[in-house]
């Protein structure tokens, strides 16, 4: 499954949507000096600008207080020129991540992490959903992978990938099993999966012989190793799977593309083109 090609299609549509909507603004907030986070924010900023958005970048020093971060978010919430706000995670340990996530207006929460948006997804009424799970679902749709009534297994239970992608799969009427670090006999579950989504952050966690013949495999893993970037699934699984995402070039490009799509969706909510629940 070619995530790079699909991401280009999504980004082209986003650019057309931005042109039709008029000015669309996104603000990113990064606290600290983590090199990976700075790289990711730079990529997101560049992608937003290429789509014709107004991209505002706030990079705060490591010693920034929680109060200062919350004050900045209050200003961005009140700024009518900003449609989407993204706070790069993780935050420094001294800052309460939950308080920061809750401080972003739900209608501007393009990461989809605010409890309001997470709750709406749980209730089957998605508003803004985390970008990586949306990217996973877009890939499955693009390649016509059947989901209704099929067995889907999600490995990983994070709030930003595992839990939301499980909810999205449930809403397609797939039968979903969630596995995690405490799951015993992981292979017994993965071999049952018609659709396998692995988002555990553990290089090669799922071996080639742990994948069902004919399955669709979405490898969310982005693990930096001495040999380069590798996923959570052994590439040899391609011999058994009917569909599989490569690493790199699979889910990674889709995450930024769907973030841009979320920003357009937030702009439509704010303009009244879509109804955002009260």
Image (cartoon, rainbow, N blue to C red):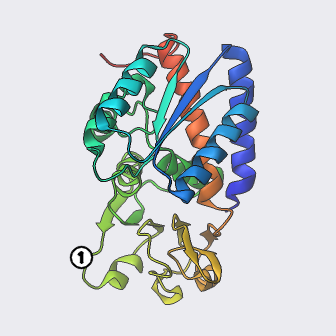
- From the top left corner, tell me how far across and down residue 209 is, in percent: 50, 89
Quarter the N terminus occupies: bottom right
| Number of numbered discs | 1
Quarter the C terminus occupies: top left
Q: Is residue 33 left or right of residue 7?
A: left
Q: Is residue 219 above or below residue 107?
A: below
- From the top left corner, tell me how far across and down residue 271 is, in percent: 52, 10
* Residue neighbourhood size for the residue with mark 1, other residues' Cα within 10 Å, grouped as few (<14), some (14–19), many (≥20): few
Q: Nearer the viewer, residue 50 or 161?
A: 50
Q: Residue at x 50, y 11 (%)?
A: 80
Q: Is residue 198 left or right of residue 121?
A: right
Q: Residue at x 48, y 14 (%)?
A: 79
Q: Is residue 214 above or below residue 222?
A: below
Q: Residue at x 52, y 63 (%)?
A: 220
Q: Nearer the viewer, residue 251 or 23?
A: 23
**Image quarter for residue 97?**
top left
Secondary structure at numbered mark 1: loop
Which residue ends up furthest to the front in the rendered image?
63
Q: Residue at x 29, y 45 (%)?
A: 95
- From the top left corner, tell me how far across and down residue 225 is, in percent: 57, 79
Please name the residue that numbered disc 1 is placed on: 182
Q: Is residue 125 visible?
A: no
Q: Is residue 243 above or below residue 213?
A: above
Q: Is residue 97 visible?
A: yes
Q: Nearer the viewer, residue 186 or 221?
A: 221
- From the top left corner, tell me how far across and down residue 71 is, in percent: 35, 24
Q: Is residue 17 above or below residue 35?
A: above
């Amino acid at each position: 499954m070619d995530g790079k090609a699909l991401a280009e299609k999504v980004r082209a549509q986003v650019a057309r949507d931005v042109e039709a909507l008029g000015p669309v603004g996104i603000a990113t907030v990064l606290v600290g000096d983590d090199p990976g986070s700075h790289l990711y924010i730079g990529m997101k900023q560049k992608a937003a600008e290429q789509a014709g958005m107004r991209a505002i970048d706030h990079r705060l020093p490591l010693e920034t207080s929680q109060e200062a971060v919350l004050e900045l978010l209050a200003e961005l919430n009140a700024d009518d020129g900003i449609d989407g706000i993204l706070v790069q995670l993780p935050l420094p340990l001294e800052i309460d991540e939950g308080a920061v996530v809750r401080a972003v207006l739900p209608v501007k929460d393009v990461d989809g992490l605010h409890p309001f948006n997470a709750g709406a997804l749980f209730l089957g009424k998605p508003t803004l959903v985390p970008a990586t799970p949306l990217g996973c679902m877009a890939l499955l749709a693009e390649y016509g992978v059947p989901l209704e009534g099929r067995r889907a297994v999600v490995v990983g239970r994070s709030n930003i990938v595992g839990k939301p992608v499980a909810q999205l799969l449930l809403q397609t009427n797939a039968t979903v099993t969630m596995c995690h670090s405490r799951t015993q006999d992981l292979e017994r579950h993965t071999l049952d999966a018609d659709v396998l989504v692995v988002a555990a952050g553990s290089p090669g966690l799922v071996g080639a012989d742990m994948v069902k013949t004919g399955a669709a495999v979405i490898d969310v893993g982005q693990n930096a190793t001495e040999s380069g970037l590798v996923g959570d699934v052994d590439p040899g699984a391609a011999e058994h799977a009917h569909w599989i995402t490569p690493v790199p070039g699979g889910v990674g490009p889709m995450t930024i593309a769907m973030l841009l799509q979320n920003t357009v969706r937030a702009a439509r909510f704010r303009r009244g083109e879509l109804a955002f629940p009260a």
